[in-house]
């Protein structure tokens, strides 16, 4: 790097770009990415990730003793804590900022505090802060520690350093230390916005590294994984083959480095590194575009700029969506309750809103409150259920008009003979056939009643729970009251429907003119039918309108009552259509009537009785749990304030930049 030039990664190739300053690691476009990085760091400081909004992050992972700390020291130009076992016990967020001032500025941020430090004391300051966060033992904590380094020549980078992966706990470490570290690492590398900086030692087989296994679990293709190979001077044999073969899917490529040794200054270390990769007989064969800490700095800076520019529009959308959702929820939140009167007022408001919603979905067919929930489009679903019920009745065996044509009618007429004139049909024969048919379908109306009211119960409870979601202490009482009421309504509907069925068995009556019209149309085919009976030479099959094709062969020897049987068949056929229509119509009318009563009067009375009854106490519970409602409102208010501040941060940065420029 003696020619004072740096290397910038423009995926997938590297191009040399002139560096306008003497800083060995700072990128030539730091002034362009600094606003982006400041915005993301500001969002991170505001803890926007607690709102479920992921930020683009370079996450540094590696097995224990992989040289992870040395890589970070080389990038930051400072000394980090060293020692046996786990040195990094908390997520260390390193914010590096190129600062032309002569004196470096360093400080730590943790537990709401800002602690200034300097290069000579940074290691001790980090240890002290870590002890305060994670305790003085060897345990770990997920609470982050932020290190801000403003120094001449450092790259503009923000990285999260995580504890090194260790499988065997040492003295003083928890037995499940591996599981704790693994869980922390997975939490940071799982989001698609994370770039994984996997630190690997040249002295080991990459495929055996636990950090590789973890990164492959969340990034199978390696599209967001960059590998840094440390200790290149310790194991130069075969290193070229390892980084070119890429057996472990490192999509963003490799960078081989030599870290500082002993008392070398960082400037001396960079000179020695350049000399190593220029003169070593094996390492000099590795392409210069993937060797050296300066190349790593430039590569990370470019990757960081690209991912930030790519993610920022989506981050803005998520912030605005979450902000709008929280504001909407706040508007729905009830007021603080301090008395029984206020609790009753809140309850009546809930009931008023719930009843209006039920009128919409159950009675008026409006579903603007549930546009995407088709199960809540109730009038349509109820019509479908009624049509299905009607189809079930129409397709039952009692509607089969062609099988054993007239045989049942002849049998009934035979048993209904009595003393009287021969040209009158016995009414008992008609009633016998009618009762048989009604009995055959008698199980279907109760089944439909149960099905339709089970559906209505689900709708009613869904609406009640939605409007009382801010008062969970009310919900069990409201759910219980709604279920009890609907069960009672269902029982009444069941009894009424069975009464209707029994009435249909009892007598035959209709004032519907369609009965006579249908019977006359059917009887107009009697001559055609009798011709088929009398002419034995012709085919025994005959097609009767509204009946279908029938076989009359077995009727030709039973002519005595054949005309009466035909008449009886046509009468019961015409009347049966009236009966089935009447059952379906009655069901629909009573259903609408019961739903009206349920919504407009019965439900509110039932729920009030449940709340103030011996097993109720819902109003008192509302008052008892009012503090939890207030806590929820406070939490939402804090979230809204935070998200508004985040929105202001990103709005300011979007006014200054064009994200497309960073993907060129």
Image (tube, helix red, strand yellow):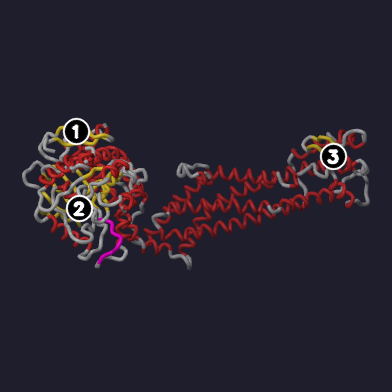
At 67% across and 43% down in the image, what residue appears?
Answer: 391
Q: Give the mark nearer the N terminus: 2 vs 1.
A: 1
The segment highlighted magenta reads 163-170
Farthest residue to the front: give it.
281
Q: Is residue 201 magenta?
A: no
Residue 2 location (% of width, % of height): 11, 37
Q: Residues within 10 Å of mark 3 (few under 14, many from 20)?
A: some
Q: Nearer the viewer, residue 637 or 619?
A: 637
Disc number placed over residue 551 in the picture, else none: 3
Assess whether mark 2 and mark 3 are in contact (beta carbons under 8 angstroms): no
Can you identify the residue that label 2 sits on? 69
Secondary structure mostly seen in the magenta stretch: loop
Q: Give the mark nearer the N terminus: 1 vs 3.
A: 1
- Mark 1 secondary-structure assignment: strand
- Mark 2 secondary-structure assignment: helix
Quarter residue 29 falls in? top left
Q: Is residue 165 magenta?
A: yes
Residue 554 location (% of width, % of height): 89, 43
Quadrant (top left, top right, bottom left, bottom right) of the C terminus? top left
Residue 209 location (% of width, % of height): 31, 53
Quarter residue 137 falls in? bottom left
* Mark 1 vs mark 3, CA separation in Å: 96 Å
Q: Residues within 10 Å of mark 1 (few under 14, many from 20)?
A: few
Q: Is residue 640 above or below residue 630?
A: above
Quadrant (top left, top right, bottom left, bottom right) of the N terminus? top left
Assess whether mark 1 and mark 2 are in contact (beta carbons under 8 angstroms): no
Q: Is residue 10 above or below residue 384?
A: above
The answer to whether one can see residue 275 in this image is yes
């Amino acid at each position: 790097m003696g020619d004072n030039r740096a290397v910038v990664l423009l995926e997938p190739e590297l191009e040399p770009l002139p560096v306008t300053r003497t800083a060995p690691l700072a990128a030539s476009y730091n002034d362009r990415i600094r606003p982006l990085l400041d915005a993301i760091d500001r969002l991170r400081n505001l803890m926007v990730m607690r709102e479920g909004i992921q930020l683009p992050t370079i996450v540094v992972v590696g097995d224990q003793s992989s040289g992870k700390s040395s890589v970070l020291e080389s990038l930051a130009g400072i000394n980090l804590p060293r020692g046996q076992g786990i040195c990094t016990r908390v997520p260390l967020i390193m914010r590096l900022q190129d600062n032309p001032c002569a004196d470096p500025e360093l400080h730590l941020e943790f537990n709401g505090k800002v602690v200034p430090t300097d290069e000579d004391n940074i290691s001790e300051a980090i240890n002290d802060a870590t002890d305060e966060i994670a305790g003085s033992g060897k345990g770990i904590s997920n609470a982050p520690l932020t290190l801000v380094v403003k120094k001449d020549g450092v790259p503009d980078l923000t990285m999260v350093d995580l504890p090194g992966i260790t499988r065997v706990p040492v003295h003083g470490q928890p037995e499940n230390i591996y599981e704790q570290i693994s869980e922390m690492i997975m939490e940071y590398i799982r989001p698609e916005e994370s770039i994984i900086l996997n630190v690997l030692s040249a002295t080991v087989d990459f495929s055996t590294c636990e950090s590789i296994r973890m990164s492959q679990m969340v990034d199978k293709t390696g599209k967001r994984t960059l590998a840094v190979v440390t200790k290149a001077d310790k194991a130069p044999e075969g290193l070229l083959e390892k980084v070119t073969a890429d057996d472990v899917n490192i999509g963003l490529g490799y960078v081989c480095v030599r870290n500082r040794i002993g008392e070398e200054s960082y400037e001396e270390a960079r000179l020695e590194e350049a000399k190593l990769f220029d003169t070593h007989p094996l390492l000099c064969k590795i392409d210069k575009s993937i060797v050296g800490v300066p190349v790593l700095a430039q590569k990370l800076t470019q990757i960081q700029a690209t991912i930030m520019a790519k993610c920022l529009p989506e981050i803005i959308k998520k912030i605005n969506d979450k902000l709008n959702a929280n504001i909407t929820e706040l508007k729905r939140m009830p007021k603080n309750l301090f008395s029984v009167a206020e609790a009753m007022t809140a309850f009546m408001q809930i009931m008023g809103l719930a009843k209006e919603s039920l009128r919409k979905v159950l009675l008026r067919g409006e579903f603007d409150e549930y546009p995407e929930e088709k199960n809540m489009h109730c009038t349509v679903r109820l019509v479908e259920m009624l049509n299905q019920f009607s189809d079930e009745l129409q397709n039952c065996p009692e509607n089969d008009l062609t099988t054993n044509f007239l045989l049942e009618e002849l049998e009934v007429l035979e048993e209904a003979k009595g003393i009287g004139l021969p040209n009158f049909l016995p009414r008992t024969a008609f009633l016998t056939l009618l009762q048989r048919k009604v009995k055959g379908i008698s199980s279907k109306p109760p089944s439909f009643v149960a099905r339709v009211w089970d559906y209505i119960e689900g709708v009613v409870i869904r609406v009640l729970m939605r409007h009382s979601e801010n008062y969970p202490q009310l919900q069990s009482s409201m759910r219980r009251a709604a279920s009890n009421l609907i069960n009672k309504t269902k029982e009444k509907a069941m009894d009424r429907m069975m009464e209707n069925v029994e009435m249909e068995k009892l007598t035959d009556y209709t004032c519907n003119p369609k009965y006579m019209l249908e019977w006359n149309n059917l009887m107009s085919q009697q001559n055609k039918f009798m011709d088929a009976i009398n002419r034995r030479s012709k085919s025994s099959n005959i097609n009767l309108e509204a009946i279908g094709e029938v076989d009359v062969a077995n009727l030709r020897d039973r002519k005595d009552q054949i005309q009466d049987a035909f008449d009886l068949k046509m009468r019961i056929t015409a009347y049966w259509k009236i009966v089935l229509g009447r059952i379906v119509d009655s069901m629909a009318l009573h259903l609408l009537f019961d739903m009206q009563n349920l919504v407009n009067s019965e439900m509110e009375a039932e729920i009030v009785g449940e709340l103030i009854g011996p097993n109720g106490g819902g109003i008192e519970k509302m008052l008892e749990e009012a503090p939890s409602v207030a806590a929820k409102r406070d939490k939402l208010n804090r979230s809204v304030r935070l998200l508004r501040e985040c929105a202001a941060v990103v709005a300011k940065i979007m006014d200054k930049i064009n994200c497309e420029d960073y993907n060129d």
